[in-house]
Image: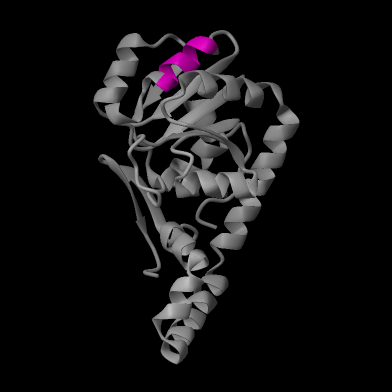
Amino acid sequence: DEIPLGPRVNEWSDKNGISEGFNFLYSGTLGMKHNPDLLLQLAQQMTGRAKVVVASQGKSVDYLREKGGDNLVLLPFQPSEDLAMMMASADVLVAILEPDAGVFSVPSKVLTYHCAGRALLLAVPLENLAARIVFENKTGLVVPPTDNASFLGQSEVLYNDGEMRQQMGEAARAYAEKTFDIEAIVELRHRRRTQLGRDGLGPFLRDDRALVDLRQQRGLRLGEIFHGGDEAVHQGLDL
């Protein structure tokens, strides 16, 4: 596995001082268009109860550093070899997508998060593919990216319900193991090519949902995942 399951307390969490208590974790690109106030308000709401850990870089992180309190832990992008331990350190993994993102624009962090086996809290357009993945597989809670009140409310739900978090984390890992299985991906690609050659483009387009999903999720288990610069880059199968 590129992203194996790991213990909540580990070498990375010890090194960064987050082994004790409850952690919401956001990792990856964070621009001002992503509404970093969501993370700031989350930290303010959870003061004395939980930490909000942000592993990113740029103006939004500078903004959070200026405004945030002691429970807002700001870290730079982490090396690829630490990603599994970093995500394992979370109780809830957080992702934010700008309101005008396209339907099929899935943040790479959402796909990576599923491998970690943790509950997700998403602030993304409800028609977005990332929201659909989470809704359909029951891997987390989703709110619109401009609804700060709902985001904070759902964070309380996850904070207070350990059983829900456990079930969502197990569902997330099960989704990842099913969806990113190399043999299934190769077989699907072969089947689609065979169907296209036999029946033409029409049937292929009428039954393209699985392929669309896999194109969005390509190579997550197979590829090497890097968090660096301003983007998370996936190198994997070209579906």
219 is higher (above) or lower (below) than 122:
below
Residue 1 against residue 153 in the figure, above or below: below
Q: Position of residue 160 (x, y in %)?
A: 69, 21
Is the stretch drawn in magenta largely helix, strand or loop?
Answer: helix
The residue drawn where x is 51% and y is 82% is 191
Quarter of the image where the C terminus is located: bottom left
Task: Name the residue: 54% across, 78% down.
Answer: 187
Front-most of 236 and 11? Answer: 236
Residue nearest the observer in this picture, 108 or 80:
108
Residue lying at the far bottom of the rendered structure? 198
Residue 98 in the figure: left or right of residue 220: left
Name the colour scheme: one colour
- The x, y position of residue 134, in whole percent, is 57, 45
Q: Is residue 20 visible?
A: no
Q: Residue at x 47, y 63 (%)?
A: 214
Q: Is residue 43 visible?
A: yes
Residue 226 highlighted magenta (yes or no): no
Relative to 117, 227 lies left or right: left
Q: Can you say whether 231 is above or below 162 in the image?
A: below
Instruction: Looking at the picture, tell me which residue is in the foreground, 52 or 10.
Output: 52
Q: Quadrant of the N terminus?
A: bottom right
Q: Residue furthest right?
A: 163
Question: Which region of the structure is painted magenta?
Answer: 38-45
Q: Residue 203 appears at what percent x and percent y?
A: 48, 79
